[in-house]
Every structure is written in structure tokens, then in C-alpha cells.
Image (cartoon, helix red, strand yellow):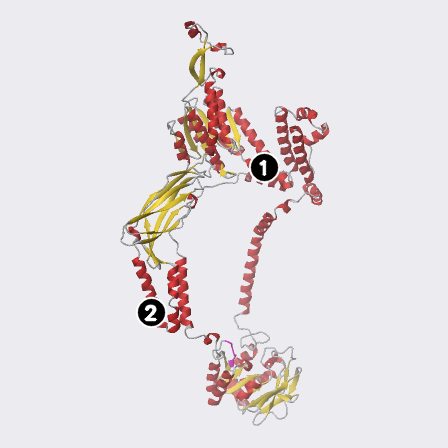
Amino acid sequence: MRISLTPRAALAALLAVPVIVLWPQWWMLLVLAVVWAAVVLADALAAADPRRIRVRREAPTQVRLGGTVGGRLLLTNPTGRRARLEVRDAWNPTAGLDDQHARLEVPSEERRAITQHFTPTRRGEHRSREVLVSSLGPLGLARRSARADAPGRMLALHPFGARRHLPSRVQRLRELEGLAAIHQRGQGTEFDSLRDFVDGDDVRSIDWRATARRRSVVVRTWRPERDRHVLIVVDTSRTSAGRLGEATRLDAQFDAALLLTALAGQAGDRVDLLCVDRIPHVSVLGSTRTKVLHDMVTATAAVEPALVETDWELAASTIAERTRRGSLVVLLTPIEAAAVHSGLLPVAARLARDHPLVVASVADPALEELAAGRGDLEAVYRAAAAERARGERTGVARALERVGAHVVDAPPDRAPQDLADAYLALKAAGRL
Amino acid sequence: MSTATRTAPRTIGSEGPAPRPGATRPGATRGEATERRRPWLIIAVALAMAAALLISVARGAYRDGPLEPDAPSAGGSKAVVQVLGDLGVAVETRRHTADAADALREGGTVLVTDPRMLNAEQIIALDEARDEGDGRLVLVQPDFVVLSYITTGIFPSGALRSGAEVPAGPGCDDLAHGARILEVPDAEDALRGPATLYTTSGSASSCFTADGGALVAEQDGVLVLGSADLLTNDGVRLADNSALVLNALSGASDADGRKGTAAASGTGTEAEVLTWYVPSSTDPMGTSSQTLLGYLPGWAGPLAAWLLLVAAIALLALGRRPGPVVVEPLPVTVRPQEMVLGRARLMQRAEQRDAAAASLRAATATRLADRLGLRHESSLDGLLAALAPHVSADGTRLRALLGPSPVSTDQDLVRLAHDLDSLEKEIDR
């Protein structure tokens, strides 16, 4: 517990000025100083004991980034004195607490609440470092302060802005499942039902045995196989720390991963997630279909890019452990010439041999602006450099396609939809 | 060879309307310049400090000023003091009136280098001390006020207009101190303006008369010298100035000057002491007037102390920090275009116009091939053939635009970029 002064204590000391003018002796100064100190000390001791104030927190545990959530701090005064309190709830700045300081009066044997509003500006975990309760004396000259035991923790989740694209993709998925006619028998399909032959049906799909049992000609229909396995691998290395517009590249990658998870959940597939750079650090494995999206949002909330290079060999061995043959592997990593040649290409070639492989990259929209620059000589040189960078990306994308991967390269606002569309295209083609 | 090829386009570029690279970002250029200049600045400062240190060591520690006993400069008096020391006179430097008065009381000789700096209180203190003891007082160029306090028969009568040699008159034998001719410099070369001349009356005696006044006067153990230049390192060399000064200061009394020199020259029975009094502004007697704070009422001091205390309390109260400073590790973000911009700057600095043009052409060719449904790998000829029916430009122009023709100037590069843009727009239409 600490005793500290308020500005009012300094004002109170000014009251001694007439006394000094009337009796300008040096011993008078000493007397006045002692009197002032005694008054301030008495005021501090007359304050309600802040250590006995009970603090309880009704804090939100989760909030989507960009949203606002309310919480309460409940203060109970069990002492016999009326408590005039100053409370500071020391959250970290990006937790977006509207006001860390609050003043309130709690009468004896009563309880009051401080309402708080959080608008976090950073994804991840936010904490309240400390709650400091200061109790002012009846004259307001001094306060006694003590720390209260009220830990606060809140998780700011990924905003998942791409979820507005989910309904249209789910509808496409339903159409895909319903339109049996466009479905051929192939890898990644399973037997759905028998129905009567209509004109236009493929004669190869006539089920002769069933036709023999019935009067009419019967065809078999196929539908995309359900309960397939999708593994999303998110690269959290140096290249993901790039700032594209408002957010980092990693945020866009998570956005795409979440949309794909939601869509695959609707399609009845199991989805796992792996975040890798030098080490595979966060993973969501074996969640049930209903819980996987929630698990993934929670798990990715605190993941931030690290300034290291990705060890793709390590990632490949981890992927091999976690998948069966035929699982869809989605690599969310930027396509950059240097990064790709350092190890992604051979790993992608190996993965594409065993799995349908999608390499999804979030492109930098600023590159397009630079490439369109024609203002002066410097802008033209920048445009040339940007065109060369784009050319390199295209070359790398083509190299990846040549080894058997599907490449999705789109700016942040398009990347989630494009990845979802690539997944639907794989479904439609019966490859999944 | 390379310089020739590189300088030629640069001159063409600077004449044309295309902006120079430096013109667009002056801030960056200036920042680089300060970065580069800093080591020179450090070296210059270090050299200056070393030079100052060397100079101060070589100069030795002395206090410079007019008639300072340690100063070897033109206006100092180191020569006189050193010769006096050789003659056996111990010279003690004093800067406070009280010390000089004590020396006078004990019967010593006191030289006042600048009596005009003294205020009335200091002059009276010196005069009283001289009355109590039997010390001698040597005043250098005193003014009327000083003389009226100390003597009764010596008055300043005017100034010596120009520097001149003043011979000792016939009437002065002891007062001449063995000097025959004194010489003082011109007013503009002199330390304190023109030399002052004095007239005497009563028991006072004077010597070295010129223009109706005397350069040296004496009364009851008060010796008045009319010019400060008699004592300076420069002035003491002139004519017989040294004889007058050394004899007058080495304790030779007016009564028998020979005895003083004899004592100094070797018998060594008693070392003479000369007090060299330099009036200073730090003298406690020099500042005795009522200070500004003295006009304040009596309660001002306690009140100021209390207000100081109140201010300290206010600072303490306002400076209180409620709880800890919350630090937060923020995630790292990187500007992704750095590499592209760096490459653009490199190309521009190396004037790689052909490389820039090649990448612009390649990008346009790729996009055109997409529009026309060609394979990316198709040759330039194939592209040009497919392009020809859709655009207004003829084959040679298209070939110059998309083919690998060299780009010689900066304007050509900008123009090429614009032409490629308009070609693409034409296909889009």
C-alpha cells in the first residue's frame, strides 16, 4: 500500500500564505509544514482501506477483431466507511479499452460496477497487467493505493471478413452435389443412388443388373466423396509479415484458411490446420466437423509472423505424418522467387505426387499500382521493377503448376474466394 | 570507355524536360548527405579540441590582462615583476582592498594598477591604512577623485597629447630615480589612452614636466605615475622607463634611493616586499551598494521558500503515475515492396534503361498474347503478325516498340512506357 498526494494537497498548502505574510519567521514555516503534513496524513488514514475493497471482473473472453465488447469491473466495499475510489485497469494499449481510469464512490457495504468497452486493434491475446485501486481521503488531499487481484484475459479473434462469401460458395457446393448428371464416376466420388434413365445420360453409367430387375432402364449416380481429409498448411515465416494494405499477409492467409475450413465443413470434409516456419508450432488436428471452425479461430488468434525462413523439408515431413494418401493439401504461402527456390519447389513436387495440392498465395496489390506508374522516370523504373517481380511470380507459379500443384495467386480481397473456388473446382472435377 | 558512354546520355537527359532522379526526393538525398558528412564533422571537432589543448599547454597557465604580473603579453607586466624578483624584491599579487590595506599598515609598498576602478570606500580604506602605518602607495594614472581622497597637493592638469620623450627637469633629483628621459607611446598605442599630467602644490614635488604638467609626482609617500605604459612589457623598454619603475618599486625610498638598490643588490639583510594590487570586481568591498533583493519586504524570503515547497508538492502530486507502464510486444510487419523499390533504384542509378525496357516489353507482350489467345512461348514474329490487323501502327513501328531495340535516353524510356500503355488500350478497345 502506498500513500500519495493529490493536486488538492498543493492547493491546501497555499492556504498557509497569509500566515507567512503576517508572521514571516522561519520557524513558522516549519510549524506550517508540520501542520500540513499532519492534515494530509490524517486524511490519508481516514480513507477507506483499499486492500479490503473486493474487485471482481466480468470480462469478455473473446471478441472478433473490429468488434466491440462490453465488460464490467465490480467493486465491493465491505468497510464501514464510504469509499471514494480511483481505479486503473491496466490493459495493454491495443486491447482498446475506452478508459483505463475510473472514479466512483462506493457507500459502505455496497457494490458498484465500472462498465468497460473493448475495441481491440490487434489480433491475439490481451491481458490486464494490474488493477490499481486508490482510495481518496474525505478531504481529497491524499490517497492510499493497493493492487487488487483481478486478472483479466481476452482473446481478439481473427475478423474472418471472408465469411460473407460463404453462403454463395455453399450454394455452389449444394448445386454440385445435386447435379448428379454432371458427375462422372472417378477418383474421389462415391455411389449415391439409382434413378431412371433420362435422355442425355451417359450410357456407360447404366446399371445393367438393376435394369434387369426392373422394367425401366436405371442409371447409377455418383456424388463427391464425403469425409475426405483437408490439411491446410499456413506459412508464418518472414514473407508472411509483409504488410498488404491494412493488414499483414498472414491475416489474409488466415482469412482464406477459415473460409476454406467453413466450406469444407459444409461439404462434410475433415479439416486440419498446421502453422509452420522453423518449427511446426500451432496445429488444429482431429476436431469434429462442428467444432473445427471455432477451434481454428481460437488457435490462430495468437499466431504472429516470425522473422525466420520456412524449413520446407520439416514441413514436408510433418505433412507426411498428418495425412493419408489422397488428402487435399493446401499450402498458404507467398509465391516468391527466392523463397520458392530455397525449398518449396521440390517439396511441392513430392507432395503433388501423393496428394491433390493447392498452393495459395496472397499477392501484393501495391505491385499493380507500381506497375501502372508512368508519372516520371522514377515511376517508370519502378514500373519496370514491378513488372519484373510479377513476371518472376508468374514464372514460379508456372513452375509449381508444372510439378502438379494448383496455384491460386490473388490480392488479399480476392484470395479467400479464389481458394474456395479452387476447392470447389477440385470437387466438381471429382478429384476430391 | 564506360565514362564516355555514360556521360553522353546524362547531359542530354539534363537538358530535356524529364525530371532528374534527385529532384523528386530531396529529403532522401539530404539525409544521405548528413550521413556521409558526419565522420568529417567528428574529425574536425576532435582536431579543434586537440589544437585547443596544445595551445593552452604551450601558453602555460597565466592570467591575462592589463598590468597583470604574470602576463607575458604586450599589456602585461611580467618583465617588470621578473626583474624585480631578480633584484630581490618579493612581489605579492593582491586582488582585495583589505589585503592591500593590511600590507600598507605593515609598512610595505603597494602598487595600485588601476585606482580608477576603486570606489570611495576602498580609497578611504587604503588612505586610512597608509595613515596608520608608514607604507608607500604607488598609484598608476589616478584620476581627480582618487587623488582628492589620498593627497592634498597633487591634481591632474591635463593629458599629454601625443607620445613624446619627457626629460627629467632640473629640479628633481631623488624623484627621477636615476632616469633621465621617460618615453610614453602615442594615445592610440597606449594602454589607457594618453598619459595624464599632474600639477603639484604645497609639500608635493613633481618631475618630468611637459605641457605644463608633470608625469611623475610625489607627496608624503604617495607616488603618482602618469602613464600605465611605464609598467607594461612593451613600454618598460622605452628610454629610461625601466630605471624609474624598477628603482621606484624596489623599495628605494625617496630619501635615499641608493640605499634600497644596495640592499637589493647583495647584502640581503632584509627582503623587500612589493604588493602588486590589481583591483578586481570580485572584491567584497567593491560591491557594497544596496542590492535589488534588499528592497523586498521581510516576508518575501519565507514566502518564496513556502511557494517552492508548494511547487514541489504539486509536481509530486501531478507526476504520480497510477500503476505500471504497460509494455506490449507488437507483431512485426514488413513493407513487402522494399525489394521492388530497391531494384528500381538500382536500375535507375546504373541507368539500365534496356533492362527496364525489356521487362516492360515482356509484361506488355504477355498481356497482349493473353488477349489475342496466343501461347506465351510464341515468338515475337508470331505476336506481331497476330497484332497487325488490330492496331493502327505499322509493322516496323510495332517491332521497334516490342522488339529488343536499344533505348538511349531517359525520355525515350518514359515515352516507350506510354506507347506500350496506349498499345494495350488499343487492343482492349
Q: Residue A27: x, y in percent? A: 35, 72
Residue B156 lies in what quarter of the image? bottom right
Q: Which chain hosts label 2?
A: A
Q: Residue A87: x, y in percent? A: 36, 50
Say which amino acid is labelled 1.
Glu
Do tags 1 and 2 sit on the same chain? yes
The answer to whether residue B178 is visible is: no
Residue A415 placement, left or right of A15:
right
Residue marked by disc 2: A31
Q: Residue A351: x, y in percent? A: 46, 25
Say which amino acid is labelled 2.
Val
Q: Residue B279: x, y in percent? A: 52, 79
Secondary structure category for the residue under label 2 = helix
Q: CA separation, marks 1 and 2?
A: 75 Å
* Mark closer to the observer (1, 2): 2
Total marks placed: 2
- Dominant SS of magenta comes to loop
Residue B137 placement, left or right of A134:
right
The answer to whether residue B44 is visible is: yes
Question: In the picture, which quadrant includes the N terminus of chain A?
Answer: bottom left
**For this rendering, which residue is in front, B404 or A99?**
A99
Residue marked by disc 1: A369
Which badge, 1 or 2, comes first in the chain's sequence? 2
Q: Residues in magenta? A: B276-281
Question: In the picture, which quadrant includes the C terminus of chain A?
Answer: top left
